[in-house]
Image: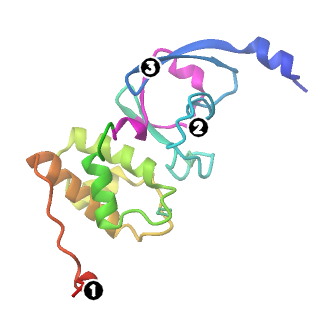
Amino acid sequence: MENVETTLMNKRILTFIVNGKKCEVAVAPNSTLAQVIREDLNLTGTKVGCDMGTCGCCTVIADGRPRLACLTLAHEFEGSRIETVESLNDKTMHPIQRAWAECGGSQCGYCTPGFIMTTKHLLDHNPNPSREEMKEALAGNLCRCTGFVKIYDAVERAAKELRTGAPVVVSPAPDEVRV
Ligand code: FES
Ligand code: FES
């Protein structure tokens, strides 16, 4: 079995651009991108659910493409530009995050960062997706809680806000009206 010393000796310094910042990290040959993001860079917004490429929780955008960070070795991304969910809220919530909160697109929230990053990629390329296009784009992201309708509502609301530049006014549902 590989001991700690051997593992340390096998580490290589890799450079990534993560959320616009250059980062140098000593990475073991078998470290996944998710491990580097969460454990070395402390960006714990990226979640690991299944850890085997089936749930989409760990989705980040690497060089402009959504990638499953649990399934890919960090070494593949040397020099890459990686965007995690932390890139979205500089000082205020990003319209996609706000739409998720306002539409109830998040319940336990574990799947949410992955959905949000996949949605970011979708809306960057298709500012006005149909429901069918949303379903297709988000097919690799699984949620056990919401039933998906609220997630598609959130994508629609975020798309509208990003297209028009104006926040979408939320009307309370009838059972939420307080008198
Ligand atoms: S944690 Fe990566 S796909 Fe599930
Ligand atoms: S909100 Fe719980 S898994 Fe999606």
Q: Nearer the viewer, mark 1 or mark 2?
A: 1
The amino acid type found where label 1 is placed reads Asp
**Mark 1: which secondary structure?**
helix
The crowding category of the residue bearing disc 2, from other C-alpha atoms within 10 Å (few below 14, some 14 to 19, many at least 20), is some
For label 2, the residue is 71
Occupied quadrant, residue 85: top left
Residue stretch in magenta:
66-89
Mark 2 CB within 8 Å of ligand 1: yes
**Mark 3: which secondary structure?**
loop
For label 3, the residue is 80
Q: Distance between the residues labelled 3 and 2?
A: 16 Å
Q: Is residue 45 left or right of residue 164?
A: right
The amino acid type found where label 3 is placed reads Ser
Mark 1 CB within 8 Å of ligand 2: no
Q: Along the line of sight, which residue is nearer the eye, 90 or 141?
A: 90
For the C terminus, the image quarter is: bottom left
Q: Is residue 128 visible?
A: no
Q: Which of marks 1 and 3 is in front?
A: 1
What is the number of callouts on the image?
Answer: 3
**Mark 2: which secondary structure?**
loop
Image disc number at residue 175: 1
The amino acid type found where label 2 is placed reads Leu
Instruction: Answer whether residue 124 is magenta in the image.
Output: no
Occupied quadrant, residue 3: top right
* Of the image marks 3 and 2, the number of the one nearer the N terminus: 2
Residue extending farthest to the front is 179
